[in-house]
Amino acid sequence: MIQQQQTMKLSPYIELYNLIIPKDNTLRQINDLVDFSFIYEELKARYCLDNGRNAIDPIRMFKYLLLKAIFELSDVDIVERSRYDMSFKYFLDMAPEDDVIDASSLTKFRKLRLKDMNLLDMLIGKTVEIALEKGIITSKSIIVDATHTKARYNQKTPREVLLERSLKLRKAVYMADESLKAKLPAKNTNDVLEDEISYCQKLIAVLEAQSGVCQLPKIKEPLNFLKEAVEDDLEQLRISEDPDARVGHKSADSSFFGYKTHIAMTEERIITAAVVTTGEKNDGKQLQTLIEKSKATGMEVKTVIGDTAYSEKENIKYSKDNEIELVAKLNPLITQGVRKKEEEFQFNKDAGMYVCKAGHMAVRKARQGKKGVGTNQTETYYFDVERCKMCPLKAGCYKDGAKSKSYSVSIKSLEHTEQMKFQESEEFRIKAKERYKIEAKNSELKHRHGYDVASSSGLLGLELQGAMAIFAVNLKRILKLNE
């Protein structure tokens, strides 16, 4: 049974909050800024309203997840800190003497209450609504870009993941008390996952028996992360890789295994839309969705600023039809080429190569035809034929026995003259200078809110992680601009 908790409980110690927590405390400011009752309204259908035991207030559970996004701690550590941190208790609408929840409740809340919710769009929409109400958003431009997030296991075996976490923990222990080295269990030396799990369990047990050293934050936090991996994600650790993650390319020589989050942001640095995809997806294909989602929040979009990935034909046509200026430099290999199978081969602007539908990138390219005669020239991209032979998607793409596999793009220099003319204008150059802002926002998400690595496996897990991280950065930005 769910009971709505909108007011602070009566307590003889309630005045402590006004004595201890300053007015400019971030959590106090967020509480004053946001009416979190929308969480109750969104989630009440997922609870029984008149039967069973009382459930923990969903607003409090949501706030716990927001604290995780802001402070980048494990479930256990975020709950433990809320036991003694008065700013946490105030933010969670707890009386100073109230006890905390069991950390396992957060896992259940994520899996049972937030499952199948469009949390990403809902939370972004809420922050944009607040920003518009306060007059913070005045621009009619959005800046678009994609940031990559590595899969939790990053193409590593489950055993390698456990090895990394246990190594980090042991290093922290040695720095704190080198004499404990003799008490730790012997390391596992084989490749059997079950043996590695058993070793980690023994390591945890030995350290927890040393009650004093385990209370040190530098040891407690890596210890809890290792426990989370062994205890909570045992089933997922037995899967050799994230089932949704894919290989994406940051340049011709570097790649990553994971996901992309495609983001739209105002010039005031408020994120207005986000789309989470697998790592191999083309950035430009998400532009129209980002614009429509931004409009759905109440934004008026007259200008879109992005890099060359967003200047493909369909985006230019869509922008013109919707009276939107597209400030994205043309790339002739994307926008001026006449090519077949456009949906099967996508151009990766970072690497300067085409990628097939299986996620394999061309290994080299060559221009053919008479120089200076655009209609007679083609850009041909060659793929690793040995990979094509073994590719599960080779039907209709690679013919058995063929000694090579290539993909060609015809170059036409007379198309997109209006966009080319706009690209040379002073207005284009001035607006293009705003694009750097979104790169800084991507860095903030990754380095301050843990969005560089997925905290769980699967697209749905990353959407939840992204929703909380973007909600946090938007609220912080609103507070900054509202000072």
Image (cartoon, helix red, strand yellow):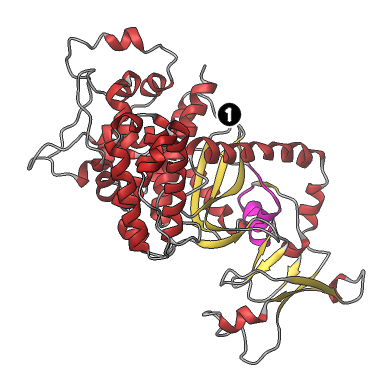
Image: 128 above or below 164 = above
Q: Quadrant of residue 183?
A: top left
Instruction: Specify the farthest residue to the bottom.
Output: 401
Nearest the camera: 449 or 343?
449
Residue picked out by circle 1 = 138
User: What segment carries the magenta color?
Assistant: 303-323
Across and down, in percent, residue 43 comes to 25, 42
Q: Residue at x 52, y 35 (%)?
A: 448
Tell me: 450 left or right of 399. left
Q: Nearer the viewer, residue 22 or 370?
A: 22
Q: Is residue 361 left or right of residue 172?
A: right
Does the magenta segment cover residue 53? no
Element marked by disc 1 = loop
Q: Is residue 316 magenta?
A: yes
Q: Position of residue 47 (x, y in %)?
A: 18, 44
Quadrant of the image containing the N terminus: top left
Near-viewer residue (309 or 361): 361
Amino acid type at image mark 1: Thr
Question: Which is more toward the observer, 82 or 54?
Answer: 82
Left or right: residue 278 versus residue 439 is: left
The residue depicted at 24 percent of the width and 23 percent of the height is 94
Report if residue 454 is visible in the image: no
Q: Residue at x 80, y 70 (%)?
A: 411
